[in-house]
């Protein structure tokens, strides 16, 4: 990815940013719902794979629905085979949604983004 791609300007509405240095680092913020997923799909087609496991920083997420969870599932399919996506800085309420939907085992969790 040659440049930083920011999907939406207003983080309150929801946003996703792909790190221009590391295509496998995604940053989510605000209300992550269908509108964010639709824009995300424009820049990350379902067949696209990352060169390394996907890391998703969720520190700024205030809300996530099933479409937002789909982005997390997309992180799983975008990661190399056998690699689990790393979700970092997951707010308690968002972690609860992931747990309740039975998706916890699909991801690794960390409090901060690891250094590369």
Image: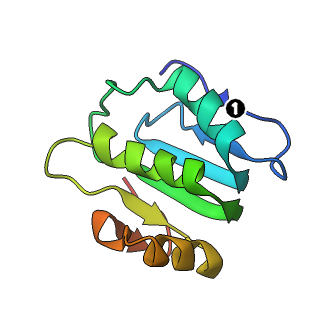
**Residue visible at 62% across and 51% down in the picture:** 28
Q: Quadrant of residue 8?
A: top right
**Residue visible at 43% across and 23% down in the picture:** 45
Q: Is residue 54 visible?
A: no
Image coordinates for residue 30, horizontal then vertical, percent: 75, 55
Name above or below for residue 23 compared with residue 58.
Answer: above
Horizontal side, residue 112 vs residue 60: left or right: left
Q: Quadrant of residue 17?
A: top right
Number of marks in the rendered image: 1
Q: Is residue 22 visible?
A: yes
Element marked by disc 1: loop
Image coordinates for residue 41, horizontal then vertical, percent: 53, 28
Image coordinates for residue 26, horizontal then vertical, percent: 52, 45
**Residue visible at 52% across and 18% down in the picture:** 2
The residue that mark 1 highlights is: 7
Query: Along the line of sight, which residue is nearer the eye, 7 or 45?
Result: 45
Horizontal side, residue 2 vs residue 33: left or right: left
Query: Along the line of sight, which residue is nearer the eye, 113 or 70?
Result: 70
Q: Quadrant of residue 64?
A: bottom right
> Mark 1, residues whose alpha carbon is within 10 Å: few (<14), some, or many (≥20)?
many
């Amino acid at each position: 990815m040659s440049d930083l791609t920011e999907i939406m300007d207003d983080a309150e509405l929801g946003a996703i940013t792909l790190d221009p240095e590391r295509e496998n680092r995604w940053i989510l913020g605000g209300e992550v719902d269908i509108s964010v997923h639709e824009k995300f799909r424009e820049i990350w087609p379902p067949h696209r794979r990352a060169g390394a496991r996907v890391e998703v920083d969720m520190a700024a997420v205030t809300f996530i629905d099933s479409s937002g969870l789909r982005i997390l599932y997309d992180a799983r399919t975008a990661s190399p085979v056998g690699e689990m996506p790393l979700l970092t800085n997951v707010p308690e309420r968002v972690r609860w949604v992931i747990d309740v939907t039975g998706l916890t085992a699909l991801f690794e969790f960390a409090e901060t983004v690891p250094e590369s």
